[in-house]
Image (cartoon, rainbow, N blue to C red):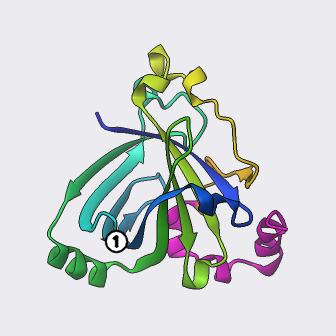
Amino acid sequence: MALEIERRFLVRGNDWRRHILWEAWLEQGYLVAAADGLTVRVRRASGAAPGAWLTLKARAPQAAGGAGPEGLVRQEFEYPIPPDDAGALLALAPQQLRKWRYGLDLPGGDWVLDVFEAENAPLVVAEVEFEPASLQPGGVPGEGLALELPPWCVQELTGRHELSNAALARCPLAHWPEAQRQDLLKALG
């Protein structure tokens, strides 16, 4: 079973820029985004690693890591597809978003940072993905998930469903109630 183990953080400022290894422009659309966490996403990338993928994500069963904090461990199945197919699927996707993604040279896991565009600006989110070996037997998060966070990671977003990419495609930040939007942006100083 393919597992995605990741933590997510709200980012403030631009100090992260000195850690950039690569960049890519991403367009992604959601063909399915169910309340139970099942998503079917199409992504097209240009830049450092151009390509297109179809990705299915779902909650992890208890035995595979579902015992950890909500949103930390998920099943993820990703398949490369022809770019023309991605374009056709994006045209069918009712919920979409665009963002710049940057690979970062930070320790502790595979770090990327997303700078959201259009109605999700000025949102910037860092993600760190861990190897499945980070989980202890029975799927319990182990010490391998501990991180020394850079100071620009100001708030953990792991498990905040309203800030998942699928949720931001469905209800962009610009459409949030003003008080809720300002509460989030307040952390950005």
Query: For residue 148, what is the image quadrant?
Result: top right
Tell me the crowding category of disc 1: few under 14, some 14 to 19, or many 20 or more residues within 10 angstroms, Cα based: few
Q: Is residue 51 above or below residue 65?
A: below
Residue at 54% over, 40% down: 72
Residue at 55% over, 80% down: 117
Residue 141 appears anywhere in the view = no
Give the residue at the far front of this rendering: 18
Q: Is residue 162 above or below residue 38?
A: below
Query: For residue 121, what is the image quadrant?
Result: bottom right
Q: Position of residue 67 (x, y in %)?
A: 54, 27
Residue at 46% over, 52% down: 37
Q: Is residue 11 above or below residue 118?
A: above
Image-based side of 45 in relation to 119, left or right:
left
> Which residue corresponds to mark 1?
47
Q: Position of residue 39 (x, y in %)?
A: 38, 58
Tell me the magenta residue range: 164-189
**Callout 1 amino acid:** Gly
Q: Is residue 64 above or below residue 129?
A: above
Image-based side of 33 in relation to 177, left or right:
left
Residue 120 magenta-drawn?
A: no
| Quarter of the picture holding the C terminus | bottom right
Residue 174 magenta-drawn?
A: yes
Q: How many numbered tags mark residues here?
A: 1
Residue 182 appears anywhere in the view = yes
Secondary element at tag 1: strand
| Quarter of the picture holding the N terminus | top left
Give the residue at the far top of this rendering: 137
Q: Position of residue 24 (x, y in %)?
A: 40, 69
Image-based side of 145 in relation to 48, left or right:
right
Q: Position of residue 154 (x, y in %)?
A: 76, 53
